[in-house]
Image (cartoon, grey):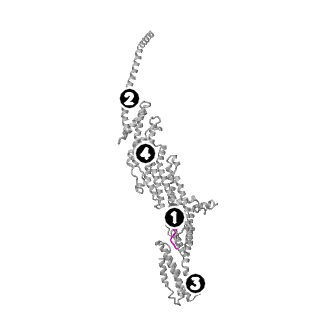
Amino acid sequence: MKAAILDSFDTRIAKLEKSILPLYTAAQLLNKRRNNIDKALLKIEDMASNQDDLSAEESLILRGPQPGQLHVYKDALERLNANIAFKGSDGDVEQIASLVETGTKKLTQLYTKVVAEGSSGTTPAPGTAEYSMPTSFPASLLPTLSPVVKFLRTLPLPSTHPSHPAAPTIAKTLMEAQRGYADMRGNWAVKCLDGQGKRLVVRANEVDPLVTGRAFGAWVELILGTADEEYNLLLELSPLSSPSSIASAYTVLLAPILRLFNTILSSLIALTKKNLQKLSFLALSAYESLLSLQTHWEAILARASDQLRDKNEFKDGLPLLRSLCLRSFPEFLADIKLSTTSRGVSDTNVNLMQFTEETVLYISRIPDVQGAVSAALTALGDGNWKMGEGVQVGMNKQFQEEDESSILEHFLNDVVSTAITSLTTISRTARRPPFGSVFLLNNISYLRTHLLLAPISRAVPALLSSSTKDLLNSNYRTAKAGYFDANFSPLMQALTDDPKGGGKGAAKEKFTRFFDLLDEVIERHRFARVFEEGEEGAEDRQALGEEVVMLVVPSLQRFIQKQKDRDFSKNIKRTPEEVESQLRSVFS
């Protein structure tokens, strides 16, 4: 009974379901259509709203960043980038990407404008305090530029946002802006450094070569300091911060600076080649400066691209300077030797030779560039400055090492020896014997005084070997002995020689000859002065006068004493006291 009731109930339910199912299916279809219509309406409303928003963003982007409203512009670009990220392949993406590209270009235009403003104006005058770092970027512009740079670095790039449709164009735009930055900063640096560089070249023939060489070194150091500062500024202000982009931009920045360096160095080298004798210390001091800055220079070039490192103006300039230095040593010795052939000078001239003063000045300047001189002499080879005369073959290694440690001493010894040999030759071949002795004494004494006793540079005696010092001292003694022999030996002989075998007549003749020779000596010394004029030679001259007095006056007194029994009052033209006074006046 119960089973029949349940079966009847199931049957009625099945009939009811069968009758209701079409209505239910139709209702579901209507609900689905209603939902689709609602979604379509929402989409239409959203698109209309987006078009309004996009129009507003487009207007803002096209106007570009306004003064004091950079944050508004940044927010707009950030919203556009967010829309691209969330909409995927939506049809508006291309339009939004185009706006992002335009906004990026507007920002880089502002960036370039501020950089151009900071890379222009009046350059500091060379030699002023402001010239110590002439290319510094104005601090007043950094508050405007730094936020722009900070935002540009957040923009999507192919390396960080490969799917962003605007990323390639943004990367290209930033790369062009960064290249423009490097170009402007490099040319501004050249404009600031050019004046000092040209000033060096213009004044090279007027200023002390050693000073010019040092000034060139200071200028190169200023270039390196500028390059360091510009690199730090590039790290701070470059829109692209990857190592490769920094290296590429730094290469662009350095290129005009290196061209300027090469131009100034080439001009100085050309000037030095024209007058190497006068400007040799310009080459030496410049060479020493570049040697000391080589490590710094290499560190700067290491930051640039390989292309720039392969074209190294600094490395190209060093060999050129070194070749000038190597030439200067044998040419200086050759000039000293050629001085012995000069003509047109009186055979009674006892003044200092020009090469004597040049030798002292040359040696006195070497301590200021000792590093460069030693390096160049080592490269030239011991003795090779003699143009082959001093080359030794088959030296063992130990001797070579010892020779390198004293190569400067060897060179200075050869300079002094060549000067003394030339002076001796001139005194014997181009001067009368009495005048030649004064000439030789004056010149040898000048060398000895200004290299050993009272050197122009206190460092010189330490550079001279013991053999060089002995050479100066022994030649001074020889020259002094020759001076006494040529000028005062005849006086002494006049009092001792007995041409007619003695007697009163012979004594009278001796007095007559003595005073005649004395008058000649006095007259000769009035225009053939011994030692330097002025205070420098006064002390030496007085000391020499004392020696002359001690030689002549006692001999005259003894001779007069021997003849005291005879009347020679008519023949004794001057008393020993008067002779002494006359001799002292000559050496006063």
Residue 350 magenta: yes
For label 1, count other residues whose C-alpha is less than 10 Å away and answer few (under 14), some (14-19) or many (20+).
some
Q: Earlier in the sequence, mark 2 or mark 1?
A: 2
Disc 4 vs disc 2: Cβ atoms closer than 8 Å?
no
Q: Nearer the viewer, residue 195 or 100?
A: 195
For label 3, count other residues whose C-alpha is less than 10 Å away and answer few (under 14), some (14-19) or many (20+).
some
Q: Earlier in the sequence, mark 1 or mark 4?
A: 4
Q: Residue at x 49, y 81 (%)?
A: 580
Q: Residue at x 40, y 21 (%)?
A: 33
Q: Is residue 480 above or below residue 359?
A: below
Disc 1 vs disc 4: Cβ atoms closer than 8 Å?
no
Element at badge 2? helix
Q: Nearer the viewer, residue 519 or 207?
A: 519
Disc 3 vs disc 4: Cβ atoms closer than 8 Å?
no
Residue position marked by numbered label 4 in the rendering? 237
Mark in the foreground, 3 or 4? 3
